[in-house]
Image (cartoon, rainbow, N blue to C red):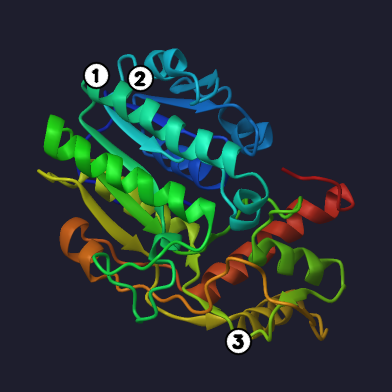
């Protein structure tokens, strides 16, 4: 999957920490780094949302190192960052509904955990830290496309936590000259994304419905739109931000495709690739959801030479194939 190289320098002697490396995006970053010969790739994960299955292929790799632990524990973060050159901080409790149901835990992981990693990274002398920010930060700001310096009021506790991350990172840049890059992900999807549980994202839920030949559930009228972003594009942004940027200040940038797709269009594509014909079931819109989302990706293009290489249609076709092979042999038991 990651044959295309997104960095120039030799990383055979470089060491990387990927927090949340057993998760969906994190494990894809780990795969890229190992494929391209990283000297050491350490994963820190407590497996609360990540899965051992996601990192199973890497366990016997000589450059891979697993550290089971929680970013809410500062001493664990300090240990994880020993002898590390680059940090990709992906660990978080995602999901707007989860944060509405349990804002305290979302804050503990996403804010306190983030601050622990930020302090430990600053003190350990890492060369670069890149972290997962979120398009939810744009909140109720109506203008499209979304531009980094124009945000509104947050619509969920999750959005609050991800915005606080950016504020802390900005303060650390000005106060301690510890400069990081935040990547505002827009609806990332692809292989290893969990279709199970109450907080699953829409694409794995749709794919699972298609493969099970059951009608998908759509919140609202289906005209809600998102800038869906295939995971390989997100990996590219992480690698280029870590290895190809000499930023001298804290920067936040959108990571997306710069295209809008409605939920109705999304189901059309997925049902076509899965070769099913089913009408969705529509229900009430979900609390805290943004109606439309579309990214301006020019800042990422200018600062880290980011260009989305995988379109939504190509990404969906690949994703459906992956789930076909992952779901069917297990008779639809939990796969992640």
**Please, is residue 70 above or below residue 321 in the view?**
above
Query: At which x and y percent is residue 322?
Result: 67, 58
Q: Which mark is residue 223?
A: 3
Q: At 72% from the left edge and 55% from the top edge, which residue is drawn?
A: 195
**In the image, which is nearer the foreground, mark 3 or mark 2?**
3
323 left or right of 154 in image: right
* Element on which disc 3 rests: loop
- Location of mark 2 (residue): 81
Q: Is residue 216 visible?
A: yes
**Please, is residue 250 above or below residue 39 in the view?**
below
195 left or right of 111 in image: right
Give the quadrant of residue 32.
Answer: top left
Dot 2 or dot 1: first in sequence order is: 2
Q: Which mark is residue 92?
A: none
* Element on which disc 1 rests: helix
Dot 3 or dot 1: first in sequence order is: 1
Residue projecting furthest to the left? 248
How would you rate the neighbour count of disc 3 (Cα within 10 Å): few for under 14, some for 14-19, many for 20 or more? some
* Element on which disc 2 rests: loop
The residues tagged by marks 3 and 2 sit, at their Cα atoms, a distance apart of 44 Å
Contact flag, marks 2 and 1 (Cβ < 8 Å) = yes
The residues tagged by marks 3 and 1 sit, at their Cα atoms, a distance apart of 47 Å
- Location of mark 1 (residue): 123
Give the quadrant of residue 213.
Answer: bottom right
Q: Is residue 4 visible?
A: no
Query: At which x and y percent is residue 179?
Result: 18, 38
The residues tagged by marks 2 and 1 sit, at their Cα atoms, a distance apart of 9 Å
34 left or right of 58 in image: left
Query: At which x and y percent is residue 109?
Result: 52, 35
């Amino acid at each position: 999957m990651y044959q295309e190289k997104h960095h120039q320098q030799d990383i055979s002697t470089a060491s990387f920490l990927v927090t949340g490396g057993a998760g969906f995006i994190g494990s894809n970053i780990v795969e890229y780094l190992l494929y391209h010969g990283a000297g050491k790739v350490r994963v820190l994960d407590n497996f609360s949302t990540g899965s051992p299955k996601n990192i199973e292929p890497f366990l016997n790799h000589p450059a891979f190192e697993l550290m089971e632990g929680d970013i809410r524990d500062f001493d664990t973060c300090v240990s994880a960052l020993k002898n590390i050159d680059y940090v990709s901080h992906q660990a978080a409790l995602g999901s707007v509904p989860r944060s509405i149901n349990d804002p305290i835990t979302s804050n503990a992981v996403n804010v306190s955990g983030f601050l622990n990693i930020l302090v430990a990274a600053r003190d350990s002398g890492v060369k670069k830290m890149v972290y997962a920010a979120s398009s939810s930060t744009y909140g109720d700001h109506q203008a499209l496309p979304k531009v980094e310096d124009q945000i509104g009021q947050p619509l969920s506790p999750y959005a609050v936590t991800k915005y606080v991350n950016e504020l802390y990172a900005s303060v650390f840049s000005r106060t301690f000259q510890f400069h990081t890059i935040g990547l505002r992900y827009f609806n990332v999807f692809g292989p290893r994304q969990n279709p199970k549980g109450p907080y699953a994202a829409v694409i794995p839920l749709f794919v699972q419905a298609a493969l099970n030949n059951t009608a998908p559930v759509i919140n609202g009228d289906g005209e809600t739109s998102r800038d869906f972003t295939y995971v390989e594009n997100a990996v590219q942004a992480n690698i280029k931000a870590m290895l190809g940027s000499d930023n001298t200040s804290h920067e936040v940038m959108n990571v997306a495709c710069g295209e809008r797709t409605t939920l109705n269009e999304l189901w059309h594509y997925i049902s076509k690739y899965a070769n099913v014909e089913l009408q969705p079931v529509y229900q009430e819109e979900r609390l805290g959801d943004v109606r439309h989302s579309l990214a301006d990706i020019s800042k990422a293009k200018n600062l880290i030479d980011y260009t989305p290489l995988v379109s939504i249609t190509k990404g969906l076709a690949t994703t459906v194939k992956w789930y076909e092979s992952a779901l069917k042999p297990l008779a639809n038991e939990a796969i992640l």
